[in-house]
Image (tube, rainbow, N blue to C red):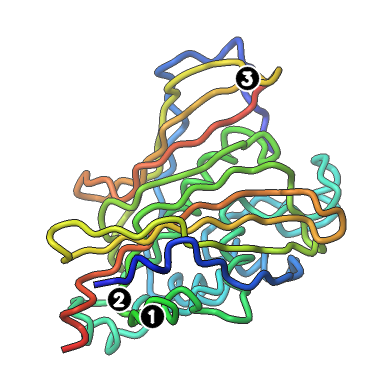
Amino acid sequence: MLDKKHIGHKFNAFTTVVEAGKIRLFCKAIGEEDAIYQDEAAAKAAGYRAIPAPPTYLTAVTNDDPDKGGLLKLLNVDIGLILHGEQHYEYLAPVHAGDRITCQSQVMDIYDKKGGALWFVVSETSLTDAATGKAVARARGVTVVRNPDAAKK
Amino acid sequence: MVNAPKFVDVKVGDALPPIKLPPVSRHQLALYCGGSGDHNPIHVDIDFAKKFGFKDVFAHGMLSMAFLGRLATSWVPQRQVRKLGTRFTSITWVGDVITIHGKVLAKREENGEKLVDVELYCTNQNGQNTLEGHATMALA
């Protein structure tokens, strides 16, 4: 089972730069071909101040954590046992290539279903523009852990 | 460039133009591994996936959520997307053919913005939903 004492745990905040080249790779992977994500001139012509980060590119921002895998280390869970249950984004201001974004994550809830066969870990991340201190997005994710006790036997 | 629908023209129940995607490939999962920074080997290393009881590698949930994002930004310019969320309801395997589709659930005004709530889905070739999502867009 997972230890509910971790509810409320705050991870170390980190700051990362949104990179145009990585947005291009992300768009290639997801099949997004709109020129605004590839070409700064096209982005500006469409009214953006630089290349915008696609809506779910925020996952690449939060994945750039230097303490990558911190949640799994905290819970002592093998990466092969997790599935993604839910993900929700609220967009408060646009994020563009060149922006420096500070991410701060916290464990909000831990609970089980099916007599402990599945555990659910809810975490929230606030994303703020490091230059202005303004919130740009909030992310809420649910990580599902498959039968953590069976794996330890 | 996307020409957004006008708030007055949108009706509850309107369908967003669906997009049928090419089959999910191993190459796509490798690109998404690098592009998203999600390096979980279960999506790209079949030996690792089998060790944890799966028949093969499978797509990152967030790859499919990116498809929902594509549907949202094919309907309105990205700057008008206020919320995007989803539940991941079943696994997407290599070779699956996903169609992204959705429809308008509600229209409302909040904080001086005209908002439209939509439901968004990824559905596989067997008619099974792999993602059941939602988004909120601001329209003029």
- Distance in Å between CA atoms under marks 2 and 1: 6 Å
Q: Residue at x 62, y 54 (%)?
A: A33
Q: Position of residue B1 (x, y in %)?
A: 71, 39
Drawn side of residue A39 relative to residue A139, left or right: right
Q: Earlier along the polypeptide chain: callout 1 or callout 3?
A: 1
Q: Label 1: which residue?
A: B44
Q: Residue at x 29, y 68 (%)?
A: A145
Q: Which mark is residue B72?
A: none
- Distance in Å between CA atoms under marks 1 and 3: 43 Å
Q: Earlier along the polypeptide chain: callout 2 or callout 1?
A: 1
Question: Which residue is nearer to you in this view: A16 or B81?
Answer: A16
Query: In the image, which is nearer the foreground, mark 1 or mark 3?
Result: 3
Q: Position of residue A131 (x, y in %)?
A: 87, 59
Chain bearing mark 3: B
Q: Badges 2 and 1: C-beta atoms under 8 Å apart?
A: yes
Q: Label 3: which residue?
A: B110
Q: Residue at x 63, y 19 (%)?
A: B110
